[in-house]
Image: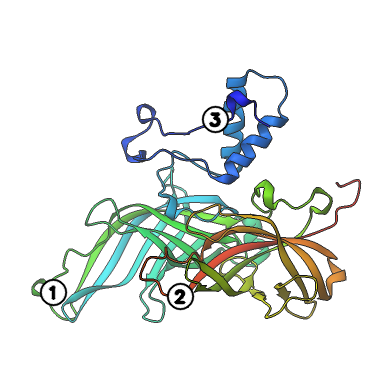
Amino acid sequence: MLPVALQNQRPSLTRNSSSMPSSHLNSKPWRPNQMFLDCFTRGFERIGTMDTSLKMQFVALFCLVLLKINTCDGVTPSLEPPLGNSLKLKSRTYEGKYVYKCKNGTMIPVSASAMLVNISDSKISLGNYSFEYSSAEPKLVGTWYLRNDDADAAESGSATSIVAGNEIASQPGSDSASLQQVLTEASFHKTFGTAYRVSYIQRLNTKGGLSPLNKSKYCSENSSVIVPFEAEFWFYTQDTIPPLAPATIAVPASDRALVDGFFCQGIINYSYDGSRWQRKNMHGKLYLMPGGDEVGSFYMKDKTDGHGGRFSLETYNPNGWRVVGKIIGSPVKVENDSIPWSLFKITSSSGNVSLVGPFSYYTMVGTRGGVPPVSSNVTKKGASWTGVFSCQFWTYKRCLPPFC
């Protein structure tokens, strides 16, 4: 436990305006979330003799790096990918162009293209970006063709690998003439290589790209205009190990042999009981990563399995398995706008569990969305709400010496 004198002195990492560019300043201080506080407390307890002030700084820096909380990159929190994804590659556009066409008196974006270069050296080519508007995919941000290194090119037989993605969050650009900054979730992959494990893409620091012709009196039907733009694209990949979990949902040390991880996209349903929203059901599909192959499903059973388990993870044939678990410990809301992280103790299983198991626990972490609206006096008892969520599931089995 922290010394009493320090229990109210956990770091308040306010951004220092004297050492930071004005474009990177935020009017609000960064406030440590539960994961940071838990990491800080445990780290402080484990470090030996060291000056108290220096010790606090060292542990805080360690936890910030470990949790990937960057306090000076200028990225709006809502545009940050969920925890469990790490920055892999930064690029910027070269000769970017947006094409608009006049339809019914309004200029509509129909396509875009740009070369991608290294963010710090424009002589290093990283690939290309393209966008084609489709009414069937209104949230499509674009497709990125990333160059493979020699090893990946030899293995895949292709010089490039491909990822496409849909917008899941946005913020205004730098001015009224600039494209929005967006967070994109991968929706499609093709060919092994640089883009294969890309899970999220940020479009940041945009300049230009919006059509100045947005009124019918300046727009003749079917006319077109080309607008130059600049942007940075930051590519994230899904981690191969789970993010650090708060202590209240930590898997017991004896069962921390990690088996596998999945990305889940799903639906969650709530009903209002007159005082609060109650979760009634949730279900989703399992993927290897955002935009990857579908490999299974997650759902709530109508009834428990006789041991209290109701939440089921299931993978498909030919070597499919199913585990059912119950929530234990105290779920932790890591982000205010996302459902809590949770620990599940497995109560029953079936299928080919013996191939990789037997499983003992699984966790739901890296959550995004799924939180019902704040209730008010006009919210009626029996009202329902349905939302979308995403998360990562990680499965575990008993860890045997000498590995534990």
- Badge 2: few (under 14), some or many (20 or more) residues near its Cα, within 10 Å? few
Q: Which mark is residue 381?
A: 2
Dot 1: what SS?
Answer: loop
Q: Where is residue 316 drawn, in percent x and y?
A: 73, 79
Q: Where is residue 38 drawn, in percent x and y?
A: 63, 41
Look at the image and tell me in which quarter the N terminus lies: top right
Q: Nearer the viewer, residue 130 or 173?
A: 173
Q: Quadrant of residue 378?
A: bottom left
Q: Which mark is residue 219?
A: 1
Q: Residue at x 73, y 24 (%)?
A: 48
Give the amino acid at mark 2: Lys
Mark 2 or mark 3: whose residue is earlier in sequence = 3
Numbered-mark total: 3
Give the amino acid at mark 1: Cys
Dot 2: what SS?
Answer: loop
Q: Residue at x 10, y 71 (%)?
A: 218
